[in-house]
Amino acid sequence: MQSQRWLPLEANPDVMNQFLKQLGVLSSWQFVDVYGLDPELLSLVPRPVCAVLLLFPVTEKYEEYKAEEESNIKTLGQDVSSTVYFMRQTISNACGTVALIHAVANNQGKLEFGQDSAMKKFLNQSSSMSPEEKAKFLEQDESIRVTHESSAQEGQTEAPNLDDKVDLHFITFVEAYGSLYELDGRKPFPVNHGSTSSDRLLEDAVEVCKKFMNRDPDELRFTLVALAKS
């Protein structure tokens, strides 16, 4: 059976906020642009921040690094809290939605949900599933698929055709129990990037994002957004 393919989401805070609103996540926290990585521009981001999303180009250099990183983690191991909500991505171009789910799922104690929130229902039903089972569960969730589809048409740029090859990818950074986690549905597990705190999440996530940029110094297609208290 051919795997599903969705239209890609734009790295646009307005689109993301509307997406979450449609799925019953109340607007006490909102996505905002991160305009630059130096301290002065980071100081413009409202606080606190509970998640950071990075959109970046998937290049040959990145794929080589990703394979090496996975091998190292499998060899050396890493500490990952069992409370971290992590899912794989099996739907083509669904990385934006997977990134949003990761951001919301790992901050349920901070965010507020409407009474009939489709997102809260999805998280409640999938919380005890394996990362692979969560991916399959998303494939069957009609409310999230329809919301993704309408959100993908809402951006400032024209949505590509379903068959167009997209080489941009979303990942999420969150803080859980004092550690900075990178959540990427294309990877088999979360990646623990070391200690952080809720106060330091944005700055520490940015340091990891700089490494992505340094691996591909000729690339300009990097976008950061933060989920901040509104």
Image (spheres, grey):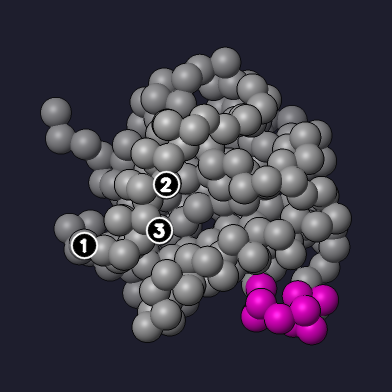
Q: Earlier in the sequence, mark 2 or mark 3?
A: 2
Q: Looking at the image, which residue sits at the far front?
A: 76
Say what amino acid the circle numbered 1 marks.
Answer: Lys
Q: Earlier in the sequence, mark 2 or mark 1?
A: 2
The answer to whether 113 is drawn above or below residue 96 in the figure is above
Query: What x and y, as percent, mark residue 197?
Result: 81, 48
Q: Which residue does the numbered mark 1 point to in the structure image?
A: 165
Say what amino acid the circle numbered 2 marks.
Answer: Glu
Q: Looking at the image, which residue sits at the far left?
A: 1
Q: Which residue does the numbered mark 2 point to in the structure image?
A: 69
Say what amino acid the circle numbered 3 marks.
Answer: His
Mark 3, Cα crowd under 10 Å, few <14 / some 14-19 / many 20+, is: many
Query: Considering the numbered disc 2 on the image, is that residue within a helix, a strand or a loop?
Result: helix
Answer whether labels 2 and 1 touch (C-beta < 8 Å): no
Query: What x and y, as percent, mark residue 162?
Result: 23, 57
Task: Look at the image and give the residue range highlighted in magenta.
Answer: 34-43
The answer for how far apart the CA atoms under marks 2 and 1 are is 25 Å
Q: Is residue 171 magenta?
A: no
Would residue 29 appear left or right of 91 to someone viewing this image?
right
Answer whether labels 2 and 3 touch (C-beta < 8 Å): no
The answer for how far apart the CA atoms under marks 1 and 3 are is 12 Å
Judge by depth and name the residue closer to the eye, 127 or 163: 127
Q: Quadrant of the N terminus?
A: top left
Using the image, tell me which numbered label, if any, was put on residue 169.
3
Tag nearer the camera, 1 or 3: 3
Would residue 101 appear left or right of 30 to someone viewing this image?
left
